[in-house]
Image: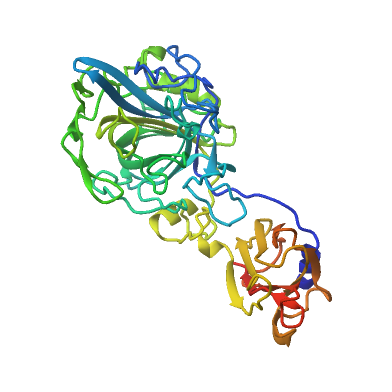
Amino acid sequence: MFRSVLAVWLLAFVVTSSSPAQLYELMTGVDTGRYPGAIGVTGTDGDRLAGTADVGALITFQGTGTPLLAPNHVGALSFLFRRGSLEPIPGFVLPLLAIDFLGGPLLDLDGETANGARSLIPVAGKTPVLIGAESHLAIEVDESGGDIELCRVDATGTNEGVSGLPAGWGTTVHALAGTTTSAAPGAPINPLTDTRAGTFTSFSGTGGLLTTVWRIENLGYEIWQDSIEPGALGAGSLGDYQYLGAMRGWLVKRESGSGLFPTLAGEGLGSTLWPSAAGGAVGMSVTVPDTTSVTIAAGIDSEDFTLAGNGGVALIDFGGDLGAWFDGVVVPNVPASSDSFLYLEAAGFGVSNSEIIGFADTVGYDLVLVAAEAELVDCNENGIHDVCDIAQGTSADVDGNGIPDECQGSWTDLGSALGGTHGDPLLEGTGTLIGNDPLTIALTNALESTTAYLILGLTQLNAPFKGGTLVPALDVAAFPLALPTGPLGEIPINATWPAGIPGGFTTYYQYWILDPAGPVGFSASNAISGTTP
């Protein structure tokens, strides 16, 4: 049965895509292309929420060239704010406010979608690509224990760019501290602040009737921000900017009977935390990615960011009631498929490891995150969201694709290459080997403009052949598949793994190439095997 399935699959390659699992996706669709009640270049601040009356003007990109993504092209409800200033002459202070608008599809910065791995490092000459998965964060809550855990942050950002600098500065990627350049989660480097844990308590409201609302407090975090500009000094590593602090907020679920969100106006949720600032962080020592440390200051030069007028302002619209803002702005934009939404805010502090002037290691690194519940995926059926398994180290994710390694297949290099004109041809396989997921079988370093024969088998033959070793048995198809190597001596095959193949099922692959430099007119790639999870 499986032999016939694979024989048909061998002749019917199709291109497809997959997206990693999400828990809460950052919401979008409000005030597209505009500032969120705050203006960046001039440093004017506002209530820091989308959908209010003090919405800013249309954003004009300040950098040179055209950014990959236009500033706030998605209409973000989530933002990172970074206070700065310039004092060109003593006593003359030019306030700055950098705003990154978070949301939309994630990016693979090396521009390669078929190499089986995602990269957060920009590559000169390569255009980053959207990978389809949406910007998100993942949490784990324990209602009975009153705890919440932050498992993952993975988001794309846009901003107005930097005057005179390339457009790459106008697009950013964001992840929790310690994340690797392949997007795999890592451990905190400032664990006393970046606890990734907080309290989670039920909230019944002023009327005592709310049953689907929870208050979140003291959720420690450290988020790294990096531009996609390959010419930046820190382009080869992560952590250009470090945003740290403790978030507070709310989680609101639909009511089980009506399927609607409760009305929150007048229920005592209070307002936003601004104009508060993280004054308590002044003098704190913070570890930076190169393991040295810096000290947090109150401001830059003569400007003190802890003083009034140097941060966000209190919410005035909706009667200053955050619950009313939820009712009027957030709830109408929650997808019908989402059972809950999450609101987090923080007046934090941060570190600038970037060469951009005007920002330093100070307070005034603030955030607002608004996200709607997405699909819960638990491939290993252990009761924990996959992204949390990966973040906690319960599951490995070597290729950084957001899928626990135990839930996807494995590829093995079996050797037995036979050298030709350019040495040994190389065969590599990537993909999960999960039904209907994409995979790539790529031949490189073969003789150009000739014919290569792909042999797919269900068992190993390991027989002498043409001066080398034929590894796969011809037990899927009686004849190999003939393919042209093209002018580069390469054959990239993008395919979809067929559904219905059981776990632990192994297939074997090898190319034999017409090549006069081979012992008897043929060279051969190494053989590889793929085993389903």
Looking at the image, residue 250 sits to the left or right of residue 532; the answer is: left
* In front of the other: 127 or 69: 127
Identify which residue, 439 or 428, lies in the foreground: 428
At a point 72% along the width and 82% down the height, the residue shown is 519
**Which residue in the rendered view is the most extreme toward the right?**
478
Q: Position of residue 80 (x, y in %)?
A: 39, 31
Q: Is residue 55 above or below residue 351?
A: above
Q: Describe the colour scheme in one phrase.
A: rainbow
> Where is residue 273, by image quadrant?
top left
Classify 5 as above or below 162. below
Residue at 63%, 65% in the rendered image:
429
Farthest residue, direction left: 283
Q: Quadrant of the C terminus?
A: bottom right
Q: Is residue 271 visible?
A: no
The quarter of the picture where residue 232 lies is: top left
Across the whole image, how many numbered discs are drawn on residues?
0
In this rendered view, identify the residue nearer to me: 80 or 500. Answer: 80
Instruction: Return the x and y of residue 527 as percentages of the image width and height.
Output: 65, 75
